[in-house]
Image (cartoon, grey):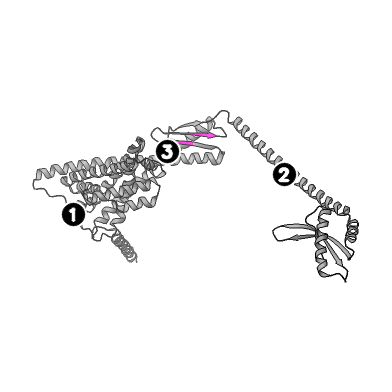
Amino acid sequence: MENTTQNSWQEIVSKIKLFLKDTFDISHDTNRSATIEDIKAGVDMKGQNAWVLIFSILVASTGLNTSSTAVVIGAMLISPLMGPILGMGLSLGINDIDLFKKAIKNFGVMVILSLLTSFLFFSIPIFQNETPELLARTFPDVRDVIIALTGGLALIVALSRQNKSINTIAGVAIATALMPPLCTAGYGLATAKWDFFRGALFLFSINTIFIASATFIVVRFLKFPYEAYANSKRRKRISQFISILAFAILVPSIFMFYQLYKKSDFNQKADGLIKNLRTEKGILVLDVHKDFENKQISFAVVGKSITKLDIEQFKSQMKTLGYDGCDFKVLQDAENLETISKINEIENSFLSNQQLLVKKSQELLEKEKEIFELKTQLQANNDKLFPFSEITEEMKALQDDIESVSYANVISTDFYNTDTIPTFKVTWKKNSKEKSKASENIRLQNWLRKKMKNEKVIVTN
């Protein structure tokens, strides 16, 4: 029974191993000779490749100038930057000194063309504004190294396949690490911003080393054949030189990766402490600067002051996080409380003014209401004082055929304006002629307008 169980487990383990091998094994589909020829053919930076490089650098520079990620990606799709770098990695992997010399020469041509193109573009004054996309390429980060390393691995693995359907995608991954730093270095040259130039060129150099290292690692892992030399002594000498050169590149690359990782980790830990300072103590923190090389964190605070005990606590927390001897420099005003008091005084004064304005607004509304009531009352008094009897007696004296007279203030509107019209309604005796009535109405209306000193008066039948 135990033997049966043991055999079952061995079978399961064997199937898992077989599945993993089928999934991750890349050696069975490797076309070594064709890959070497393809890389050698792409090393040259002349003719078509040179012009395409110039155009792609111009497109990438435009994208960085406008902070347009889509435009930068478009430039990466047509960029031939990876040719000489792959050539360097391959030459180290197969001990081909001639290919290495050729790759180095074309790599130099590639860098000079790229820098010159971006320099000319950014020399135009309207393209010299400092954008976030340019600023982001002025210092190396561990994530840039990861992009370069994984992009280089992806490209050489894709190139070594018999089916090269994903070469473009891998090429974009490499261009991601190479093109923006080169364009930013050209911007630094054109604007004499040497921090931009040095930082971007350093980032480009790191990415180049890691892409070439990735190519070298995969070439050796897939056991590409070494370059054959007729002279055995020369072959041995070249092999030793290449091995020393590869070792000289790989070891600093590992150390560089570790340093960039520690720098990113240091910045992340410092950001965490400053975030806690903001949220837990309610202190406004400004102008944060983190110096990994000197283990120094400096910032300015507004509002509450930070005590020496707080700073000692920060140092202890950084030591716990793995960074002993970290120095904190805090810029703060000793008269912070007085400043806050003045701010509060200004706020209180503002609130008092707002309350006063509200009170004045209420008083104005009350005055307007009082004026409206007085006008209404005045109109009512005018109505009471209107000498209706006197006027009608005079109308009767002017025209004996009048039988009766009515008077009212008619409110009229044309939906744009509303007005009150004094209106007299005259009833004539039955034996009066219609023509005579019309003319007499007009005569009475004119007389009443003069009498009442109001041109709005109307007389109707």
Q: Is 306 situated above or below 59?
A: above
Residue located at (45% from left, 37% from top)? 318
Residue that mark 2 sits on: 361
Looking at the magenta stretch, what is its main secondary structure?
strand
- Give the residue at x 60% y 33%: 340
Secondary-structure class at tag 2: helix
Asked if marks 2 and 1 touch (Cβ < 8 Å), the reply is no
Q: Quick check: marks 3 and 1 in contact, CB under 8 Å?
A: no
* Gap between marks 3 and 1 measured at Cα: 49 Å
Q: Is residue 414 left or right of residue 277?
A: right
Q: Residue furthest left?
A: 231
Q: Residue 455 occupies which quadrant of the picture?
A: bottom right
Position of 150 with respect to 246 (left or right) is right
Q: Is residue 233 magenta?
A: no
Mark closer to the chain start, 2 or 1: 1
Is residue 298 on the magenta stretch? yes
Query: Element at badge 3?
Result: loop
Q: Is residue 366 visible?
A: yes
The residue beneath circle 1 is: 37
Per the rendered image, the range of residues in magenta is 287-305
Q: Nearer the viewer, residue 384 or 374?
A: 384
Q: Marks 2/3: CA distance?
A: 63 Å
- Kindly identify the amino acid type of the residue bearing the numbered disc 2: Ser
Tell me which corner region of the image, top left, top right, bottom left or bottom right, holds residue 334: top right
Q: Which residue is mark 3?
A: 322
Residue lying furthest top in this view?
Answer: 334
x then y, percent, for residue 449: 81, 55
Q: Quadrant of residue 251?
A: top left
Where's the N terminus, which quadrant? bottom left
